[in-house]
Image (cartoon, rainbow, N blue to C red):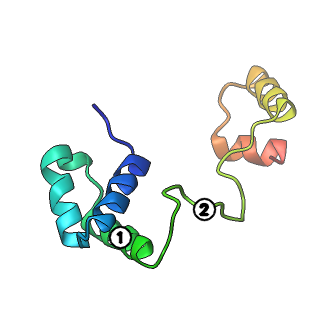
């Protein structure tokens, strides 16, 4: 069974309510999750945030360029370029389509 990062953060939040520190929180996650547990530094950072009063376990919105942009126009342009020549590289497609 996979446990998400948000679920692990929720556990850390509960651990803080039970007066556990970052070392205790991480050491309790490791036997249960093994290699899927968050790294100690990440646990320490989130435990610190919860100790300072953070309530949410979700990531906050960040400004900047989105990881991906999907629009019908972009899809059509890329499909047309690939239809014309299947040997395009990603860099060539980016330059040719201005996306």
Number of numbered tags placed on the structure image: 2
Instruction: Give the mark nearest the N terminus, 1 or 2.
Output: 1
Residue drawn at x 17%, y 45% is: 32
Quadrant for residue 39, please give it: bottom left
Q: Secondary structure at mark 1?
A: helix
Q: Secondary structure at mark 2?
A: loop
Quadrant in the picture for the N terminus: top left
Direction bottom: furthest residue: 52
Residue drawn at x 77%, y 31% is: 78
Q: Looking at this view, is 48 or 76 the one in front? A: 48
Q: Report the mark closest to the observer, 1 or 2.
A: 1
Indicate left or right for 45 with 25 as reference: right
**67 shown above or below 16:** above
Q: Residues within 10 Å of mark 1 (few under 14, many from 20)?
A: many
Q: Which residue is mark 2?
A: 60
Q: Residues within 10 Å of mark 2 (few under 14, many from 20)?
A: few
């Amino acid at each position: 069974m996979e446990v998400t990062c948000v679920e692990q953060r929720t556990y850390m939040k509960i651990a803080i309510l039970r007066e556990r520190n970052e070392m205790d929180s991480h050491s309790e996650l490791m036997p249960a999750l093994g290699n899927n547990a968050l790294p100690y530094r990440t646990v320490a950072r989130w435990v610190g945030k919860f100790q300072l009063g953070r309530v949410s376990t979700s990531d906050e919105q960040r400004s900047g360029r989105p990881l991906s942009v999907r629009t019908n126009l972009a899809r059509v342009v890329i499909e047309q370029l690939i239809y014309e020549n299947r040997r395009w590289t990603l860099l060539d497609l980016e330059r040719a389509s201005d996306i």
